[in-house]
Image (cartoon, rainbow, N blue to C red):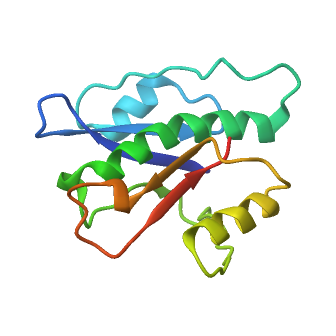
Amino acid sequence: MPYAWVPEFHADGSRFHLHFAVNRYVRKSLVAQVWGRGIVDMRRIDDVPVGAGRLGEARVAAGYLSKYLGKSFSDVRIANRHRYDVAQGFQPERIPIWGTSAQDVVEKSTAYFEGAFPSWLWNSSEAEEWFAPPAIAVRWT
């Protein structure tokens, strides 16, 4: 079964919780039994436009998870850890896009997505406590 998850620190700053998405209904009791690590709170994503189909549903779920993925890039406590993970065999396809600058790559990526402009952009040069090689994260919804 395809799934994706993104970690986030609890408000207490010491424990994680996970934002998890699957492509079908799963009983809460089954998730609680398999998880076995504490509270399970499940919610159905219900703001999918009528007629959006499976791709539209996947985009809404990806947008939901991306909010938390973006938070993890600015949280130094998560450095060198998984920012997300997916079910085995469902890894995203890698699409190399080369350019002469970050702006050039974002523009070429926008063209790849048929001219849709990014809905969110994060640049490590704007992160005060970024001590790794330069990085940019971009989201299209």
Q: Is residue 30 above or below residue 113?
A: above
Pinpoint residue 26: horizontal percent, then vertical percent. Answer: 56, 30
- In this picture, residue 80 sits left or right of residue 6: left
Pinpoint residue 123: horizontal percent, then vertical percent. Answer: 43, 58
- Comparing 81 with 139, the one in front is 139
Q: Is residue 90 above or below residue 67?
A: below
Q: Residue at x 50, y 40 (%)?
A: 65
Pinpoint residue 38: horizontal percent, then vertical percent. Answer: 23, 30
Q: Residue furthest right?
A: 51
Quarter holding residue 44:
top right
Q: Number of callouts in the render?
A: 0
Q: Residue at x 65, y 63 (%)?
A: 106
Quarter holding residue 124:
bottom left
- Comparing 2 with 16, the one in front is 16
Q: Residue at x 79, y 21 (%)?
A: 49
- In this picture, residue 110 sits left or right of residue 134: right
- In this picture, residue 121 sits left or right of residue 24: left
Q: Is residue 100 above or below residue 139?
A: below
- Image quadrant occupied by the C terminus: top right
